[in-house]
Image (cartoon, rainbow, N blue to C red):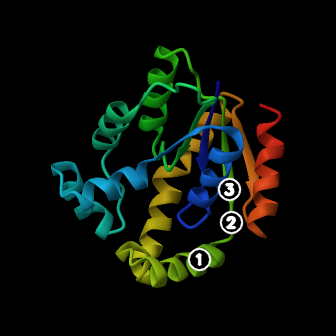
């Protein structure tokens, strides 16, 4: 099984690339952002609670996200693995994911990190906010807060996977297809 953590700051292109990889490699695409947005749209208890954090550009607490992931994990069927998009975001989540995947006999194959310069992230997020209606992509202060949180809380997850020799950086700028080819080159080595 191929189980990939697709990693990077907000605006790095994780969702776009995960969608392409899902189709090309016959993977399940598990996006915590999408799951949270679905919960918010349905006004579930989790969704309403998550919205408070997301609207401030903050991370949803680990226990809420981990519980959601566990409840949404489905057997792979004919799929060849899972691509995790936006999860794990903390070392505690990474450890919980490892425990869950190891218990299922499907360990994480590797973390692929999309590397994108700060100014490019800001531009991408503001453009997405203008077209998507996402409130967390429409204000510079919220975007800067999200990126700051990524660097302080989320980037340590890279060290977690580096210690396991499962960390693979990929340049996340350029044409979407070029970036996808870079990702596929790394995945083919896993």
Residue 164: percent from left, percent from top: 66, 27
Taking depth in this image into account, of 136 and 26 the one nearest to the observer is 26
- Please report the residue visible at 77 percent of the width from the left and 59 percent of the height from the top: 179
| Left or right: 190 in relation to 120 | right
Give whichever of discs 3 and 1 has the lower sequence position: 3
Quick check: marks 2 and 3 in contact, CB under 8 Å?
Answer: yes
Q: Which residue corresponds to mark 2? A: 116
**Picture quadrant where residue 161 is located:** top right
Residue lying at 54% horizontally and 82% vertically, measured from the top left = 127
Q: Is residue 52 above or below residue 19?
A: below
Which residue corresponds to the image point at 30% horizontal and 69% vertical from the top-left? Answer: 56
Residue 27 in the image: state x and y as whole percent.
61, 37
Label 3 crowd bin: few (<14), some (14–19), many (20+), radius 10 Å: many
Give the Cα separation between the discs numbered 3 and 1. 14 Å
Tell me if residue 177 comes above or below residue 20 in the rendering.
below
Task: Check the image and report above or below for 56 versus 45.
Answer: below
As drawn, the residue found furthest toward the left would be: 45
Q: Quadrant of the N terminus?
A: top right
Question: Looking at the figure, which quarter contains the C terminus?
Answer: top right
Q: Are circles 1 and 2 on residues that touch, CB within 8 Å?
A: yes
Distance between the alpha carbons at the discs numbered 2 and 3: 6 Å
Return the x and y of residue 61 as percentages of the image width and height: 30, 47
Relative depth, front residue between 7 and 39: 39
Q: Report how many numbered discs are placed on residues in the image.
A: 3
Give the foreground label among 1 and 2: 1
At label 1, counting other C-alpha atoms closer than 10 Å, the crowd grade (few under 14, some 14-19, many 20 or more) is some
Residue found 15% across the figure and 50% down from its top: 45
Q: Which residue is mark 3?
A: 114
Residue designated by label 1: 124
């Amino acid at each position: 099984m191929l189980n990939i953590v697709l990693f990077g700051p907000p605006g790095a292109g994780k969702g776009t690339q995960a969608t392409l990889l899902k189709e090309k490699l016959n993977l399940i695409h598990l996006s915590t952002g999408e799951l949270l947005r679905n919960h918010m749209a349905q006004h579930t208890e989790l969704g309403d609670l998550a919205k408070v954090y997301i609207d401030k550009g903050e991370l949803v607490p680990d226990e809420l996200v981990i519980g959601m992931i566990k409840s949404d994990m489905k057997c792979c069927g004919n799929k060849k693995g899972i691509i995790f998009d936006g999860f794990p975001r903390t070392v505690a989540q990474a450890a919980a994911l490892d425990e869950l995947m190891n218990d299922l006999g499907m360990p994480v194959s590797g973390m692929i990190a999309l590397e994108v310069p700060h100014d490019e992230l800001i531009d991408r997020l503001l453009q997405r906010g203008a077209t998507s209606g996402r409130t967390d992509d429409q204000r510079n202060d919220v975007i800067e807060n999200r990126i700051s949180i990524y660097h302080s809380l989320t980037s340590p997850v890279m060290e977690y996977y580096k210690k396991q020799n499962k960390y693979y950086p990929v340049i996340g700028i350029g044409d979407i297809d070029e970036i996808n080819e870079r990702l596929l080159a790394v995945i083919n080595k896993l």
